[in-house]
Image: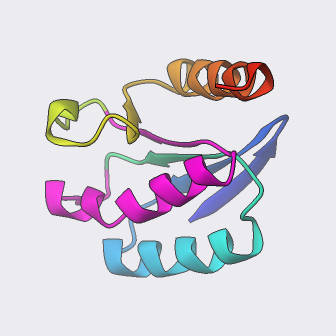
Amino acid sequence: MQIEKKEGFSLITFDNQPFSNLFKSFLEFEKTNKEENIIIQFSKDVNILKEDFFLFLSIAKQKKENGTSFVIINDEIEIDDFPEYFNIIPTLQEAEDIIEMENIERELGF
């Protein structure tokens, strides 16, 4: 797992480790960075199943309730299989746009 601090968010890249190890490392990071917007990007080497994405649902919901954004970059998953508040986006640029849009919505009180 690689973490890159960017302006307005942390970009976490999951590399070729087993998903269970990556998820555990992510949970440790998230505990100490609850107030940050987070984007997760999976390398093509990570074997992730649809069921694995469901592990992030409670985190996405909690981040939204806390006034922060959580976005996953993946272009292979069917986003209609997940709740609307769960942001799964195909590119980094779109993920950055989602964070910017959600920040504006929070500023306007939505």
Quadrant containing the N terminus is bottom right
In the rendered image, is residue 14 in sight? Answer: no
**Residue at screen point 55% across, 71% down:** 26
The boundaries of the magenta stretch are 45-74
From the viewer's perspective, is residue 41 above or below residue 55? Answer: above
Is residue 59 highlighted in magenta?
yes
Task: Tell me which corner region of the image, top left, top right, bottom left or bottom right, holds residue 69.
Answer: top right
In the rendered image, is residue 73 in sight? Answer: yes
Residue 95 shown left or right of residue 75 in the figure: right
From the viewer's perspective, is residue 101 above or below residue 22? Answer: above
Residue 62 shown left or right of residue 23 in the figure: right
Report the label total: 0
From the viewer's perspective, is residue 45 above or below residue 102? Answer: below
From the viewer's perspective, is residue 103 above or below residue 82? Answer: above
Percent x, y for residue 3?
Answer: 69, 57
**Residue at screen point 75% across, 52% down:** 36
Quadrant containing the C terminus is top right
Q: How is the image coloured?
A: rainbow
Q: Relative to the observer, which residue lies in front, 67 or 93?
A: 67
**Residue at screen point 67% across, 76% down:** 31
Task: Tell me which corner region of the image, top left, top right, bottom left or bottom right, holds residue 87.
Answer: top left
Percent x, y for residue 38?
Answer: 63, 48
Percent x, y for residue 102?
Answer: 63, 26
**Residue at screen point 81% across, 36% down:** 8
Task: Tell me which corner region of the image, top left, top right, bottom left or bottom right, holds residue 7.
Answer: top right
Is residue 72 highlighted in magenta?
yes
Percent x, y for residue 25?
Answer: 55, 78
- Farthest right residue in view: 7
- Farthest front residue in view: 109
